[in-house]
Amino acid sequence: MPRNGHPAKTQGLYDRIADVQNLAMKLNGYRESVAKYLRSLNLDLGPDSLILDAGCGTGIVTMAFQDAGFQPRHSVALDLSFKSLEVAREQFTKRVEYADATTAVQSNVLSMPFADNTFDLVLMCGVLEYTPLDDGLAEAARVLKKGKPLVFCP
């Protein structure tokens, strides 16, 4: 996989494999595993919370977050791949609780189009291993409100 030194290559790769990746994630139970992991964390998030799934792919983690019982005011699913976001939007619209409370945004996790201190939680699952680590962490920290959690998972 490209290490985001070449965003166009990374985007092209994930545009080509989005459907297959989504099917593989469904078949291997990734969404359920992530939901279980998120439930195990002591995340103190209120109903007015704004969360970001940075590098959301096809939206599996965004939905796992809500499956885990969290009900934020709004979720933002961000990814570089247009096709992955298309798949994510299709899944979000199938369930009202996702469609009404989720926005999909096409952007690079290394230069996100959000103000500093915007989010109450940032999720990065399967993302940082494909980016320059210091840059990825710095950008996540920039958009995260001070003292709020940054959650990683493979």
Image (cartoon, rainbow, N blue to C red):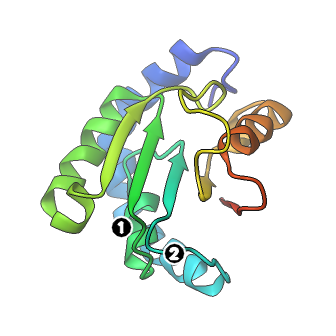
Q: As rendered, which of 149 and 33 lies closer to the eye? A: 149
Q: Position of residue 59 (x, y in %)?
A: 38, 52
Q: CA distance from mark 2 to mark 1?
A: 32 Å
Q: As rendered, which of 18 and 52 lies closer to the eye? A: 52
**Residue holding disc 1:** 27
Q: Is residue 22 left or right of residue 45?
A: left
Q: As rendered, which of 123 and 10 lies closer to the eye? A: 123
User: Tag 2: residue type?
Assistant: Gly
Q: Position of residue 13 (x, y in %)?
A: 46, 25
Q: Position of residue 106 (x, y in %)?
A: 41, 28
Rendered residue at 60%/59% (across/down):
120
Residue 133, above or below 27: above
**Residue holding disc 2:** 46
Residue 28 in sight from this viewpoint: no
User: Tag 1: residue type?
Assistant: Leu
Residue 86, above or below 35: above
How many residues crowd mark 1 within 10 Å: few (<14), some (14–19), many (20+)? few
- Give the total of numbered labels: 2
How many residues crowd mark 2 within 10 Å: few (<14), some (14–19), many (20+)? few
Rendered residue at 65%/41% (across/down):
143
Q: State the SS at label 2.
A: loop
Q: Position of residue 133 (x, y in %)?
A: 81, 37
